[in-house]
Amino acid sequence: MENTNQVQNNIVIQPVSHEVTIYAEPIFSVGKFEITNSLLTSWLTVLIIISFLIVLRKKMKKVPGKLQNFFEIMMEGALSLCDQVTNDRKISNKIFPLVFSLFLFILVSNWLGLMPILGSFGFIATEGGHSAFVPLFRSGTADINTTLAFSLMVVIASNIFGIFTIGAWKVFNKYVNLKMLGSIFTKIRKDPSILIVAPITFFVGLLELIGEMAKVASLSFRLFGNVFAGEVLLASMSAIFAYLVPTPFLFLEVFVGLIQALIFSLLAAVYFTIAAQDHDEHEEEHEHSKEKLVHG
Amino acid sequence: MDTNTVSSAVVNLAPLAKAFAIGLSAIGAGLGIGMIGAKAMEAIGRNPEATGKVLVPMLIASAFAEAVAIYGLVIAFSIK
């Protein structure tokens, strides 16, 4: 959308731009902290989820009504999907609250950006010579800050979960493989190839650290990119032909919002499972079964 | 009035950069999603009853392949 300058009486008047900006626009400030429209919408999301769940809690009975039935079906399905990822009911029970809350929040946040009326409230902000329309509500996950916060939380929490499950020394050895360096001295007589294997394994451990950074980047950019690109797409389609052309894209965006929420929470469950896995236990089991085959 | 026109000495490569960013990413994503869909179609063709079981993993894998193109799109948006 181009700004065409009109010159009247030597004063340049620019029309209001309605472009979608990649950074969320601040609405007001509390002291030095700026409240952006994405933050406002995130608060609205939390409000919607909490009120929905309070209503659900008040109407909870032994024989479920329609709403409670629907939610029970959803929770059963989600728990079984989590079981497919973790292969262990105990770990599923531990991570299910976090993973399901992530799913709910991201789902409602993605869909809230598609509500037709919400994007129209706003005000016109003038900076320098440019004036732009600043909407009051913008999808919470269309802000890179939200998605970055979520992915950082998931990666750090999965490591902390690993520390709780298998102990800090093993988690430390995943990244800085001191055990391998030590085993150069202990296993050098039994297995001389350890001299080559151990340094390689040590550097693979260091690469895992970079892999964690890659996880943060990929999680955040996947969610942000999908939601933000959806917003830009809808705006562009509306500019072509107001109400007819965006309709199939709206359906696509509803679908994409659901899929992206599902993928984010599924990946979170996968990271938690990987962090809680103990490779040494698997190796010992293999060695024991091999010994049984040889001796038995 | 004499007006001197000065033509720009520097070619603005930013639009070209944006186009390359999303264009090349889209090639990779298109190939990836096409291959995923092809294998899924094959699986459904061999065993039509397994459609429900094949559909959901296919969608999830497609979303992963598409995400890489989305990375390129974000870069295209952030190039000024």
Image (cartoon, helix red, strand yellow):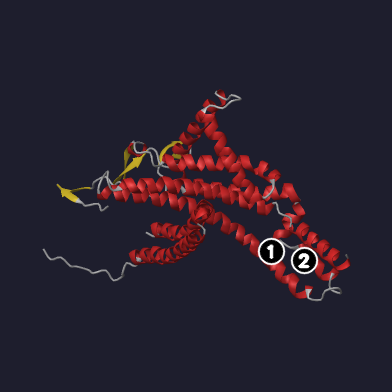
Q: Nearer the viewer, residue A242 or B63?
A: B63
* Residue B51 spot, x, y in % from top left: 50, 53
The amino acid on which the numbered mark 1 sits, given as a three-letter code, is Gly
Q: Is residue A172 left or right of residue A74?
A: right
How far is the residue under mark 1 from the one under mark 2? 10 Å
Q: Quadrant of residue A63?
A: top right
**Image location of residue B37, percent across then percent down:** 46, 61
Circle 2 SS class? helix
Residue drawn at the location 63% of the way across and 42% of the way down: A96
Q: Secondary structure at mark 1?
A: helix
Q: Position of residue A141 (x, y in %)?
A: 47, 45
- The residue at 66%/50% (across/down) is A86
| Amino acid type for the residue under numbered disc 2 | Met
Check if mark 1's residue and mark 2's residue have beta carbons within 8 Å.
yes
Above or below for A105 versus A272: above
Chain letter of disc 2 in the image? A
Viewer-proximal residue among A215 and A73: A73
Observer able to see residue A129: no
Q: Earlier in the sequence, mark 1 or mark 2?
A: 2
The residue pinned by badge 2 equals A180
Residue at the spot of label 1: A205
Left or right of residue A210: residue A231: left
Query: Is B20 above or below relative to A39?
Result: below
Front residue of B68/A61: it is: A61
A59 on left or right of A173 = left
Label 1: how many Cα within 10 Å (few below 14, some 14–19, many 20+): many
Q: Quadrant of the C terminus of chain A?
A: bottom right
Q: How many marks?
A: 2
Image quadrant assignment for residue B9: bottom left
